[in-house]
Image: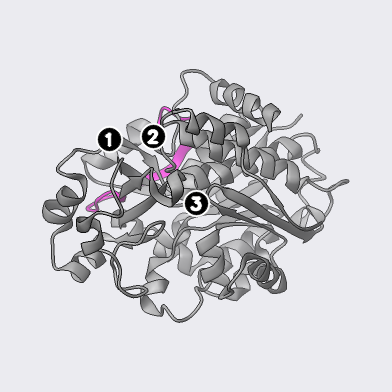
């Protein structure tokens, strides 16, 4: 067995989670979006603090948030962000088979110091996680309604980009590309990285890396032109360099411009993506692949975990924040576990074409499903272990039941 190096770049921030926010209440409806990209709140979607203030004419910190939460403090503060949460779960699940490194930035403030201390409790290497002087740390207020969608639950996100505005592709040094797996997570919340996405993906493929992109709601492009589909970073060229694309239902439709997921997957396939996974909350996961890495996997669906659903109905507490990010991390961990049994020389061909056998996308999807489901059992996206292997043991039980 060989250690698999996973490097990720993208969104890392402080999540402030407010549970039991009623999306049907009069005050929530006051701030509801009236048309796409106008900056208002929408269940399951993200807006920026400044855009919500412009939309409503009210201050988010002193007026909107206190009204929505009835003056409560956050129920939980936790590490958040599609890239870092996925990487942490991958490092926990593939704790024996991988080494995981994050590339990103934090702000010169108390929130940044607190976030850094929390990150140091995880197994992710922070050597390339750097302070941006004079900037505030990115954060998101996560408004959660566990009763929404017939008690399946949903969240609404209000984001402050902060220091992430200033993080550039040039700051991601050559060591990032000296990896087996390169992860680009939630780059729409790190705008300069997103704008350089195709070049970074191309470079990763030229170095023989397996590339994974897990997406986030792209409010900047939604605001700029809500009638058009979102570009993948700086354009469609990026798809040719993506071995595995992971998106949720809404993101897949907006990226493709299609009206249903089968059509969206066909769009991504036509643009050159090697494999696609699409989640949809508590509903089935779509998967498809046609590549040298994963072979041919006809478009199909896998159900979410019945054991998780049963536990939630029986009253096990938590929220759905970070389910999609942990799903991505579980998928990445499974890929790393499979790659760990392949010699370093044979897995370093461009795009991984030198593998003797295909990686199992179905197996990786199963680990994603139980990882995403397990995230419903605690508040926030990140689970802090007391010892190495703790989370893997808990997930293994769910995996065996699945």
Q: Quadrant of residue 97?
A: top right
At x 55%, y 25%, the residue is 391
In this orientation, does residue 167 appear?
yes
The disc, 2 or 3, on the residue closer to the chain's N-terminal end is 3
Closest to the observer, 135 or 259: 259
* Element type at mark 2: loop
Q: How many marks overall?
A: 3
Task: Give neighbour class at mark 3: few <14, some 14-19, many 20+ (Cα, 10 Å).
Answer: many
Q: Is residue 249 left or right of residue 271?
A: left
Q: Residue at x 64, y 47 (%)?
A: 181
Could you tell me residue 398's position as x and y percent? 63, 29
Q: How is the image coloured?
A: one colour
The residue sitting at the top extreme is 387
Q: Is residue 164 above or below residue 338?
A: below
Q: Residue at x 57, y 67 (%)?
A: 199
* 191 displayed left or right of 325: left
The residue at which mark 1 appears reads as 75
- Tell me whether circle 3 and circle 1 mark residues in contact (CB < 8 Å): no
Q: Nearer the viewer, residue 219 or 41?
A: 41
Q: Dot 1 lies on which element?
A: loop
Q: CA distance from mark 2 to mark 1?
A: 8 Å
Q: Residues within 10 Å of mark 2 (few under 14, many from 20)?
A: many
Q: Percent position (x, y) of residue 114?
A: 28, 35
* Residues rendered magenta in the picture: 120-140
Indicate the quadrant containing the C terminus: top left, top right, bottom left or bottom right.
top right
Kindly report the distance in space between the C-alpha atoms of the residues bearing marks 2 and 3: 24 Å
Left or right of 68 in this view: 295: right
| Residue 118 numbered tag | none
Q: Which residue is mark 2?
A: 379
Asked if residue 170 lies in the magenta stretch, the reply is: no
Q: Which mark is residue 9?
A: 3
């Amino acid at each position: 067995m060989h250690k698999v190096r996973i490097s990720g770049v993208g969104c890392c921030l402080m999540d402030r989670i407010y549970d039991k926010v009623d999306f049907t209440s009069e005050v929530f409806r006051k701030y509801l979006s009236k048309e796409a990209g106008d900056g208002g709140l929408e269940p399951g979607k993200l807006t920026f603090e400044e855009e919500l203030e412009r939309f409503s004419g009210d201050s988010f910190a002193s007026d909107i948030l206190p009204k929505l939460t009835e003056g409560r403090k956050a129920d939980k503060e936790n590490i958040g962000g599609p890239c870092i949460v996925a990487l942490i779960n991958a490092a926990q699940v593939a704790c024996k088979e991988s080494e995981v490194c994050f590339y990103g930035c934090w702000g010169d403030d108390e929130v940044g110091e607190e976030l850094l201390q929390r990150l140091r409790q995880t197994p992710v290497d922070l050597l390339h996680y750097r302070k941006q002087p004079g900037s505030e740390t990115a954060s998101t207020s996560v408004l959660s309604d566990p009763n929404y969608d017939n008690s399946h639950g949903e969240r609404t996100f209000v984001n402050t980009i902060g220091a992430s505005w200033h993080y550039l592709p040039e700051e991601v040094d050559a060591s990032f590309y000296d990896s087996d797996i390169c992860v680009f997570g939630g780059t729409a919340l790190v705008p300069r990285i997103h704008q350089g996405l195709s070049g970074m993906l191309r470079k990763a493929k030229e170095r023989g890396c397996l590339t994974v992109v897990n997406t986030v709601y792209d409010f900047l492009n939604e605001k700029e032109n809500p009638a058009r589909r979102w570009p993948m970073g700086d354009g469609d060229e990026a798809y040719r360099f993506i071995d595995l694309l992971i998106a949720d239902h809404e993101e897949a439709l907006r990226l493709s411009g299609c009206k249903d997921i089968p059509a969206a997957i066909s769009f991504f396939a036509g643009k050159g993506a090697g494999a696609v996974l699409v989640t949809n909350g508590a509903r089935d996961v779509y998967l498809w692949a046609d590549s040298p890495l994963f072979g041919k996997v006809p478009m199909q669906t896998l159900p979410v975990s019945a054991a998780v659903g049963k536990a939630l109905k029986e009253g096990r507490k938590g929220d759905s924040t970070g389910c999609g990010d942990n799903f991505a991390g579980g998928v990445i961990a499974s890929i790393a576990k499979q790659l760990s049994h392949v010699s370093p020389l044979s897995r370093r061909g461009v795009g991984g074409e030198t593998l003797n056998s295909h990686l199992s996308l179905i197996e990786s999807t199963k680990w994603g499903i139980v990882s995403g489901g397990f995230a419903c059992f605690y508040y926030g996206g990140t689970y802090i272990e007391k010892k190495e292997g703790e989370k893997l043991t808990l997930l293994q039980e769910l995996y065996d039941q699945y």
